[in-house]
Image: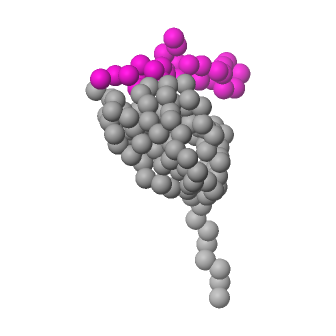
Amino acid sequence: MTDAHTDPLDPGGAQVPRILCDTTSLAAAASAPAGALWRLTEPGRQLDANLVRIPPEGRIDTHTERDLDVLLLVVTGNGTLGTARNPQPLAPGSLVWLPHGAARSLTAGKDGMSYLTVHRRRPGMQIHPRPHT
């Protein structure tokens, strides 16, 4: 595995592919806290990605992502995806499409659950001058 601190640019200054982390090891650590265990922070990226841990029987309440489709990959543990129709069981390897505008919730099982999300990067906040009146 490559060192996460290796220079991400080739001699010509272009980004090069590289391994960023081992999601299974991060998620399986006995001391893994709840919340984000890892975030994609590479400069110039077009994507955002997060490795998130929900504690045993913890829950992310029903919410809707208005603008972005999200891919969710369960890495460790299990749980349930709440949808407008029927709850869907989640296990390691479950790959879920969360379409924008769709309400969803996540509930971890008795051992907790860790998952990776990937979506298009949100543009940074922009401050515009006030219009003159």
Q: x, y percentage for residue 31?
A: 28, 26
Q: x, y percentage for residue 2?
A: 52, 13
Q: Nearer the viewer, residue 110 or 86?
A: 86
| Picture quadrant of residue 121 | top right
**Residue at the image position 29 percent from the left and 23 percent from the top:** 30
**Residue at the image position 65 percent from the left and 48 percent from the top:** 99
99 in the magenta segment: no
**Residue at the image position 61 percent from the left and 45 percent from the top:** 98
Q: x, y percentage for residue 10?
A: 66, 19
Q: Is residue 60 left or right of residue 93?
A: left
Tell me the quadrant of the picture where the C terminus can be found: bottom right
Q: Is residue 132 left or right of residue 114?
A: right
| Picture quadrant of residue 54 | top left
| Picture quadrant of residue 66 | bottom right
Q: Nearer the viewer, residue 48 or 91?
A: 91
Question: How many marks overall?
Answer: 0
Principal secondary structure, stretch drawn in magenta: loop
124 vs 23: above or below: below
Q: Does any portion of residue 5 appear in the rendered image? A: no
The boundaries of the magenta stretch are: 1-30
Q: Is residue 76 left or right of residue 43?
A: left
Q: Nearer the viewer, residue 37 or 64?
A: 64
**Residue at the image position 49 percent from the left and 28 percent from the top:** 91
Q: x, y percentage for residue 75?
A: 48, 26
Q: Does any portion of residue 14 appear in the rendered image? A: yes
